[in-house]
Image (cartoon, rainbow, N blue to C red):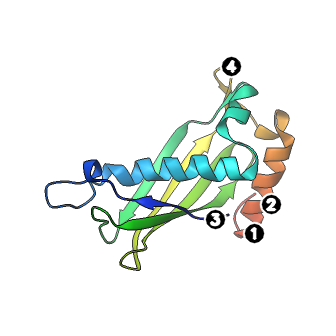
Amino acid sequence: MEPYSRTAQYHETDQMGIVHHANYVKWMEEARVAFMAATGFGYETIEAQGVVVPVIGIEVTYKKPVRFAERFEVVVRVKRYNGKILELGYTIRNCTQDTLCTVASSKHCFLQDGGMIPLGSVMPELDAFLRLEASKAGADR
């Protein structure tokens, strides 16, 4: 998949022109939505099946800041997937400075009618895709 990329906006920064830490999590979500759409299983497709995909955990390590007007990219990959829990990994690189800025992960589950479900019971094609991507990463299935 192509990395998600864009430019840091003025409203995302503090008075020193450094991007506020909370915006990195927003960028992860933007990249996750783009990643899922690129797979052919966008959130609108998943939600049309009555499935929601909440965030149940997030971890972010900040290494270098992104500043106003700098270009950055977010690479998303499947780290782990066991049919019920999906963990995605993210790296955020500052393209302008050519530096690694952030390493992060998010965990998600799949809910239908308020209860956790094995995704394969509702969307076997997406389940198969996520299992394949997890196996490429050498992750748990």
Q: Tags 4 and 2 in contact by the CB under 8 Å rule?
A: no
Label 1 sits on what residue type? Lys
Q: Residue at x 67, y 33 (%)?
A: 44
Split into 4 quadrants, where in the image is the C terminus? bottom right
Q: Which mark is residue 136?
A: 1
Say which amino acid is labelled 3: Glu
**Can you give x and y, in whole percent of width and height, for residue 23 in the image?**
35, 50
**34, above or below 99, in the image:** above
Discs 1, 2 touching: Cβ within 8 Å: yes
Residue that appears at 82% across and 40% down: 120
Label 1 neighbour load within 10 Å: few <14, some 14-19, many 20+: few
Query: Which residue does the numbered mark 2 point to in the structure image?
Result: 132
Separation of residues labelled 3 and 4 (CA atoms): 33 Å
Label 1, label 3: how far apart the Cα atoms are: 16 Å
Query: Disc 2 marks which amino acid?
Result: Leu
Q: Quadrant of residue 92?
A: bottom left
Q: Which residue is farthest left?
A: 15
